[in-house]
Amino acid sequence: MTTLQCISPIDGSVFAARETHSTSQVNSNLRAARAAQKEWAKRSIADRAAIVMKAIDELEEANDAITLEIAHMMGRPVRYGGEIGGVRERASYMASIAETALAPMEIENSDQFHRYIAKEPVGVVFVVAPWNYPYLTAINSIVPALVAGNAVMLKHSTQTLLAGERFGAALKAAGLPDGLFHTLYLTHEETSELIAARSFDFINFTGSVKGGQEMERAAAGTFVGLGLELGGKDPGYVRDDADLDAAVDTLLDGAMFNSGQCCCGIERIYVHESLYDAFVEKAVAIVEDYRLGNPLNKETTLGPMANLRFATEVRAQIKEAVATGAKALISPSLFPADTGDTAYLAPQILVNVDHSMRVMRDESFGPVVGIMKVANDEEAIKLMNDSVFGLTASIWTKDVAAATRIGNRLETGTVFMNRCDYLDPALCWTGCKETGRGASLSVLGYQSVTKPKSYHLKKA
């Protein structure tokens, strides 16, 4: 066995540790899950949804403790109060549409034939969740999987080691039958071996491009479905008719909230030349007002990055950009907590940037954003599409027709107008290019955790 350790970015101490599961333990859990799933699938959708929603109530009761744990594990300031609001929004919506989404597709029900397509649970769903939003990301898969009648095995990130246990405790308190939900502690190698052995019936992974590639290699030849949400380099575009104040406030929050560690966070901004100078001036004023520090302190607005190696990568991108002509607008002296050798990283705005720089091309996943001046929509579209990623894009304009026209040409999973960094549970969460494949949330979120079965019943 291997010891998994959550190293707190607050002070570099070990916040939590767990031993990995043995092969026999994992196999025992899988047998229990498959046995329990068969009975669970016989229960009504309403019964299953009610238990899942009661578990959300249990998580809400524990939210104060969870918020503290998140701060210790990955550095998000306690002032933001955890994730339960978004968790409830997504879970409630998915539960509310379950009866319709999981209903058979009726083709014919006449005197001669009853023809329909049923939607059956796939069996055991394996969720591999990330650390940046340990509850919000995992809930996207856990809720539809359980409501659809599946068992769930959850492997959470080592950085947020305790989140899986919180889910398990909430589901148990809500009355979920034994065996249906298991938290697994595994190394990357053990995870790949289980996938290659076809231990699961669907796999949902949120993480890095490299991690997604490893998942695909492990699953090759198993014919098991994979949902992959991987990297991002989400752009914002401010047209000449945009509400400038709203655009600056929202895009900068989208770039810096959670220390920039958001799947759909804004990582590059393109501003029409008529608004560029004013946008940059306002953006600098916002960022200079942030307070970088211990996330346990109420006055802290920006905590450390989740891990020193993440901060090291962002520092390297900034340094490389400046060395090749970019200008850094935020003085490090405003953020003394950033000593250059810890996970505490000062936010940064870069101008004079271009797409030859990694900071405008590679995923940063930190509190840095590059801002470029553009002359028109055509230039903005070209730059927004100049990326190997495609998760979301944010367009700022008063013209809905223009936003739609631009959105039609963008290579992305979601098009926002006058907002960013948000998941609408009624719309599918999906990406293209190296951001991955598959869809979660919305009606489509039930498709991956169910399998179709056709019935052609001749009555006479």
Image (cartoon, rainbow, N blue to C red):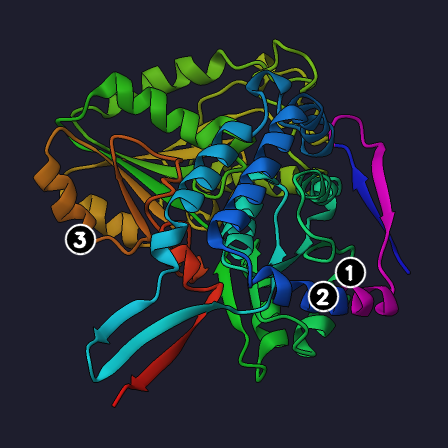
- Distance Cα–Cα, label 1 vs label 3: 41 Å
Q: Residue at x 36, y 40 (%)?
A: 424
Q: Amino acid at mark 3?
A: Asn
Element marked by disc 3: loop
Q: Amino acid at mark 2?
A: Thr
Q: Which residues are magenta?
A: 9-29
- In this rendering, position of residue 380 left or right of residue 337: left
- Distance Cα–Cα, label 2 vs label 1: 6 Å
Taking the magenta stretch, the answer to whether it contains residue 20 is yes
Residue 94 in the image, given as x and y percentages of width and height: 42, 46
Element marked by disc 1: loop
Q: Residue at x 51, y 46 (%)?
A: 49
Residue at the spot of label 2 = 191
Residue 348 in the image, given as x and y percentages of width and height: 49, 27
Q: Quadrant of residue 16?
A: top right
For residue 443, say whether it is visible: no
- In this rendering, position of residue 450 left or right of residue 187: left
Q: Nearer the viewer, residue 52 or 10?
A: 52
Number of numbered tags placed on the structure image: 3
Residue at the spot of label 1 = 187
Asked if the residue under mark 2 is in contact with the one under mark 3, i.e. CB atoms within 8 Å, the reply is: no
Q: In the orientation shown, which residue stands out farthest toward the bottom?
A: 460
